[in-house]
Image (cartoon, helix red, strand yellow):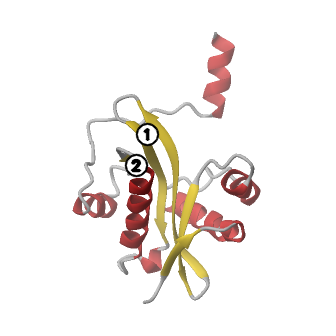
Amino acid sequence: MNFSIRDAEKSDMNQVLKLIQELAIFEKEENAVEVTEADLIRDGFGSKVLFKCFVAEVDGIIKGMALVYPRYSTWKGPIIHLEDLIVTEKMRGTGMGTALLNEVVKYGASLGVRRINWEVLDWNEPAIKFYESKGANVMRDWDVVQLNENGIKNYIKSI
C-alpha cells in the first residue's frame, strides 16, 4: 500500500484527534482524551507552537501520526519527546510506523538533539519489539510519574 509522510496542517487536526481517540481505546483509556481539535490547532499552529506533528496519509486520509515536542535534559541538553506514534490498526505492518519514526528521528537530528524520549506500555509487546528492533533502549526499571489536573490542584492546596 502506498502512503506518504508529511508535516501536519491545521486542517488535519480533526483526523489526528480521531487517531488519538483510537489510541486511547487501544490503551484501555477511552474516556481519558480531553484535548479538542481547537486545542490541537491552537497548540500546534498558534502564536506559541508547542508541538510538531507528522502524518501518514493514504488517498487523502490520515492513517498515522507522530507528535513530538521539545524538552531539556539536565544530563544531555536539548532532547525531544515523542508523545505518540499512532498507526491505525488496519495499517499496522505496512511500514507506516517505521516511516513515521524515521521522520521523527530525522527531525530530531536536524534540531541537534541528544536524545529522543518516549514511553510504551509494558503490556504492548508488539510496540516494544518494534522499538527495540530500531535500536531503542526500553528502560524497564523506570516508572512514569504524573500529576494529573486534580493532583496539581490538591498539591497546590496542600502547600
- Quick one: 6 or 32, which is closer to the camera? 6
Q: Quadrant of the C terminus?
A: top right
Location of residue 62 with respect to 21 vertically, above or below? below
Give me the residue at 46% from left, 74% from top: 89
**Which picture quadrant has residue 94?**
bottom left
Crowding at mark 2 (Cα within 10 Å: few <14, some 14-19, many 20+): few
Quick check: 25 left or right of 158? left
Residue 77, position as x, y percentages in the image: 40, 35
In whole angstroms, how far apart are the C-alphas of marks 2 and 1?
8 Å
Answer above or below: position of 114 versus 100. Answer: above
Residue 140: mark in rendering: none
**Is 106 positioned to the left or the right of 13 in the image?**
left
- Which residue occupies 26% across, 62% down? 134
First of labels 2, 1 by sequence position: 1
Q: Quadrant of residue 157?
A: top right
Residue 143 shown left or right of residue 19 in the figure: left
Location of residue 126 in the rendering, given as x and y in whole percent from the top left corner: 31, 64
The reply to whether discs 2 and 1 touch (Cβ–Cβ < 8 Å) is yes
Please state the horizontal and vertical placement of residue 86, each as a whole percent of the image: 48, 65
Classify mark 1: helix, strand or loop. strand
Residue situated furthest top in the rendering: 159
Q: Name the residue under label 1.
A: 78
Residue 99 visible from this viewpoint:
yes
Inspect this view and state whether residue 27 appears.
no
| Snapshot quadrant of residue 156 | top right
Q: Which amino acid does label 2 sit on?
A: Gly
The residue that mark 2 highlights is 112
